[in-house]
Image (cartoon, grey):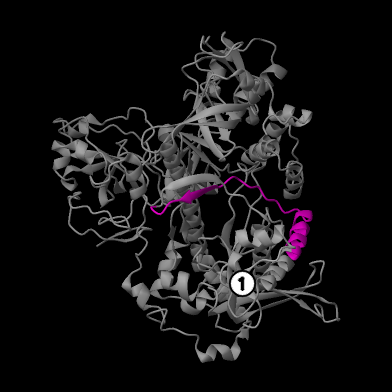
Amino acid sequence: MSKVEGLGTIVQETPSPLKPVGFTPTATGGKFGAASAIKSTPKKQQPYINKSQYSPQVNKKPRKIFAEYISKEDSDAGIKDSSMFRAVLRINPKNYQECFLDHPKGSSYPDVLVLGQDRNRAMQGDVVIVKLKPKEEWLVNYVEYVKWWGQNKTETRNLGKTDNNTNKSEKRCLRDEINDNGVGVDEVPENCLITVGAIVRIDEKKHFRVAAGKLQQMPNAANPNVLFVATDSRVPRILIPKSEVDQEFFSRPKDFERFLYTAQILDWRADSIYADGKLIKLLGMSGEIETETEKILFEHQIDHSDFSDECIASLPLTTAEAWKIPDSEFNYRRDFRDDIVFTIDPKTARDLDDALHAKHIDDCDGKGTPGIEVGVHIADVSYFLKEGTELDKWASQRGNSTYLSQIVIPMLPRILCEQLCSLNSGVDRLAFSTVFKMNYEAELKDVWFGRSIIRSRVKLAYEHAQDFIENPEKDFTADELPEISDGNMPSEIKEKTLMLHRIAQLLRQKREDSGALRIELPKLKFVMDEEKRPQGVSIYEVKDSNKLVEEFMLLANMEVAKKIATHFPDTALLRNHPPPKEKMIEDAVEQCKRIGFQLDGKTSAMISTSLRKYQGKSRLDMCIRQVISSLTIKPMQQAKYFCTYGKDLEVYHHYALNVDHYTHFTSPIRRYPDVIVHRQLAASLGYEEKSERKPKEIKDICIRCNDTKQASKEASEESAMLYFGVFIHSTGKMNCQAVVLGIMDLSFDVLIVDYGVVKRVYVDKMKREYVKQDEQLVLYWPADPNAENGNKEEFSTVIQMCSVVTVLLVPVKEVEVSAIMIRPTLDKRKVLESTLKDMKSTGSTILD
């Protein structure tokens, strides 16, 4: 047995070498466990190979590639005197030699850039200590610098040998301008420069140092290692001792090309471009899987039945069938079984952790004012999951469930998340409820919190609830809905749904009027066959039924946050959302202005008001929304869990929701922070003693859950892109309409309108002219005698932000998809003559 940080226990059935012998495909991923998606590894520059390491000249001192780390004492002193700062490293996934850090002076400054070897062996997400490089080494911010030069200089600027007028790796630094144009170091304003730093110490290794990838032989056969190439280009290539690899790999390497391994980094020396590591798991393939698509799909299966015996033994039960609610629970819980409670979830959901009820009441405020009672009932996970048990420790490490395109990796065992805790219809379930009394204008008059017992009448899908909303006069039959229990009728379920919908609309309007902001990015939705292969794909549409549920979950989370923050000012677990980075949001606003869409970015309310101008349902409005959303989402920071100890009240604020208190209470089946919040709410109500966890323990849980939530989000996005690739491979080439998001000299980025996928279109093989100042790329198309009449001669087209182009999605190696711009027809050339702004101003319907 071996332990890998953050991954739990990994079982190796046989000692090294890991050999793909007798590999049998199973529903859970095969003998060697879970497998990951294989992606083409981006080509890296030729690495430095330390030949002296294997040279007979053993006395020759190895060349240092990276700087040695400074001591903790030195880094503390540097932070104290402000010569250094601490930050979280973000590595460009498309260029591992380009990294970013939040600026130490705050969000009004652009990110600090770290280039090449100055990354100094740090990994994505690591907390690092950074020292700024001398100002002469800072890069020129081309657009701002050229603008400053034109306003302050009369002579012609000498471009020198390298000018930042390309998207190549060569960047022009201030020293070049000093040498070529005689500017002074202090003469150039900081907004014309990009701050550059170097990492001098890794303060906290957040990255697990574990990755999936393939094996390659080293060019030098005498080298005692093989090379592990990770699928994530941000991970360095790893040296694996030959002793850990099956010897057939060296005589029959092609037999191993289809196999995927997991490796762990053990060390990364300052004198090597490669990290040192070991293999920890074979995720491979058998020869029975023949096609590339089958291979990828098989590798993407997840072994999620990995809860230890100790975890299961810590539960107060053995089987779901043998358990029933103890009589003692009825003595103190509020009984809602006579109310018409029901769930609204995705069709395929099995972990139902929230249910609703609504009914008219005669007195909502103690003054005889009629109104509505709404109950939000959440699965009482904390009844089964006791603090400090083995399962509790496991859940706190996993942090949350992860939702992939074809499967869910649950945080809790299925006996809980799909059976005893899931609010399934027709059975009694333990819940933790928040009950709201409000008038018919949705003004909140009273809130009750407490443990309860409910009995859901029906498991509605969002589609069923939407059908009620869109067809309020229709008489629905039992055959049109899932099974309804306890003798209730479809008309009753419809009535309650419409009642909730009306209140949700009012609540949402109040939130928006108060400055709440919602930026919706497209999300892919797949139709799968029985073997989990994608048969169709579309953008997931958020409808009124989704918003109905969301409004009441938000309300419950906000009210619970106020309650626990009042009772436990030092240990409450809340969730905040910092405002966007000032400089980046200013740049986004300026970019929107240049493309013709005015945006006010001063507050969340102003951004929200600006976005609502483009809420139409036409295809043109959809394109505009997607472009604006893609620009405004970049400056936004991540919402995070935090412990209230020592925090000022202003830190509590949630920017997007524009509220002062917020937490996560409504999904304890799939989020561990919600479990903590349930326990804190229970303690505040006197159901339990206050937890003995200290503020530092709560803080550590918050940090861990922030990390796992982000990792799950990335995994979900990668899964969607994987299955999108599989879909394109199965359907073949596809013509798609796309909107241009960014221009470079050799390429441009486009947003595929129908799928919300961003692709880069390379035009490096074409005759072209790049005009950076105008952010335009002129493409010259050769004559084509086979083209339609009037389109046979050579011509040029201008590509700019918000141009609408037609691209061809082409399946390439494994499951990758490339976007290619094809020679425009006469009709497409006419579309290219207008941007989205032009189409909006003229009321064009050319996109519909």
Looking at the figure, which quarter contains the C terminus?
A: top right
In the rendered image, is residue 651 in sight? no
Give percent across and percent down for residue 376.
Answer: 65, 72
Give percent across and percent down for residue 308.
Answer: 33, 69
**Residue 5 occupies which quadrant of the picture?**
bottom left
User: Up-down: is 184 above or below 111?
Assistant: above
User: Up-down: is 195 above or below 22?
Assistant: above
**Front residue of this view, candidates 291 and 397:** 291
Q: Mark 1: which secondary structure?
A: strand
User: Up-down: is 408 above or below 262?
Assistant: below
Looking at the figure, which quarter contains the N terminus?
A: bottom left
Residue type of the residue flagged with mark 1: Phe
* Left or right of residue 676, residue 19 in this image: left
Give percent across and percent down for residue 48.
Answer: 30, 29
Residue depicted at x 13% and y 36%: 251
Q: Is residue 504 magenta?
A: yes
Q: How many marks?
A: 1
Which residue carries the number 1 mark? 342
**Front residue of this view, candidates 369 and 143:** 369
Q: Residues within 10 Å of mark 1 (few under 14, many from 20)?
A: many
Q: Is residue 810 magenta?
A: no
**Front residue of this view, candidates 641 and 297:** 297
In the rendered image, is residue 444 in sight? yes
**Front residue of this view, candidates 843 and 634:** 843
In the image, which residues are magenta? 502-531
Give percent across and percent down for residue 225.
Answer: 20, 39
